Image (cartoon, rainbow, N blue to C red):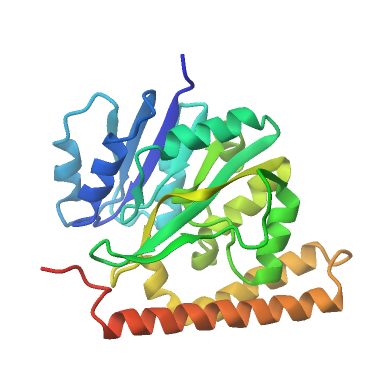
Amino acid sequence: MQPLVSVVVPVFNGLPHLTALVDSLLEQTYPNLEIVFSEGGGTDGSLGYLTGLDDPRITVIEQPQGTSAAENWTRASQAATGEFTKLICQDDLLYPEAIEQQVEDLRNHPSAVMATASRDIVDASGSTIFRNRGLSGLKGDVVAGQATIRECYLRGTNVIGEPLAVLFRTEALQGNLPWLDDNPLMLDLSMYQKVAPLGDVALRTNSVGAFRVSSGSWSTKLAREQVNQTREWQDTYAALHSEEISPADRRRAVLGRTTQTTFRRVTYKVLATRGRLKANG
């Protein structure tokens, strides 16, 4: 039998986009799935919608009001029982063959503790903004995990991608819980920094899903704080690897951070001006 894959979804006031995500999960071509929704105390009807779903693969767990994002991500991850785990946020989408492809990537590369892939960027209505984003500076089918995190430092951005692009070996993920949001923008990268160096990272250049930017998405709300939070992560990384970081590396990291955060802020501003951060209707 094919390995069990756990898809875990932390939810907080996830409507209206949550319904599209659920459809994308139920349409996966990979047959051996468990899908765990962890509802974090929202008030928009997400819990009622989720508990009304009729599919034996689905489990819904409830968290109390006041549960933080990191706590909800952690509790969702703890509920995974499969050999592999994918955490995906409520606004995002998976393409039908995503899990099938990434399970193959991890099985083909036993040294890999996680797999990642390109993803598309879509607006609030689901229209494509960018295709095949991610993996900048990473080449081949597999890259050493430590080198992958170093590339994030040098480029001043998360080249691995949002959680929708990642499939973990569950043992590696659960062995490094909890997720931490003391630096909220780096919640995902902080976990990758713990897991990836345990082995290799398997790469896939085709998009496995779509990351949605909207007026309600966390990354949009944090846009103004991105420079400071990225600098904080880079400074911490450089302090941990001081013997490996040259003055040229530090200059490159500053340039990468400035370029990436400026590009992101300008993109959000243009999308907002064009009304693409709010869903039609």
Residue 206, compared with residue 228, is above or below; it is: above
Image location (x, y in percent) of residue 7: 40, 37
Q: Nearer the viewer, residue 98 or 176?
A: 98
Q: Quadrant of residue 176?
A: top right
In the displayed image of the protein, which residue is found farthest to the right? 243
Q: Residue at x 29, y 31 (%)?
A: 59
Q: Residue at x 77, y 68 (%)?
A: 238
Is residue 178 among the parts visible in the rendering?
no
Tell me if 82 is positioned left or right of 277 in this view. Answer: right
Image location (x, y in percent) of residue 175: 61, 37
Is residue 53 among the parts visible in the rendering?
yes
Tell me if 8 is positioned left or right of 250 in this view. Answer: left
Residue 183, compared with residue 260, is above or below; it is: above
Q: Nearer the viewer, residue 16 or 105?
A: 105
In the displayed image of the protein, which residue is found farthest to the top? 1
> How many discs mark residues in the rendered view?
0
Q: Quadrant of residue 105?
A: top right
Name the quadrant of the C terminus.
Answer: bottom left
Q: Quadrant of residue 250?
A: bottom right
Residue 96, compared with residue 224, is above or below; it is: above
Image location (x, y in percent) of residue 38: 33, 43
Q: Nearer the viewer, residue 172 or 84?
A: 84
Q: Residue at x 35, y 30 (%)?
A: 29
Image location (x, y in percent) of residue 177: 56, 44
Q: Residue at x 28, y 36 (%)?
A: 27
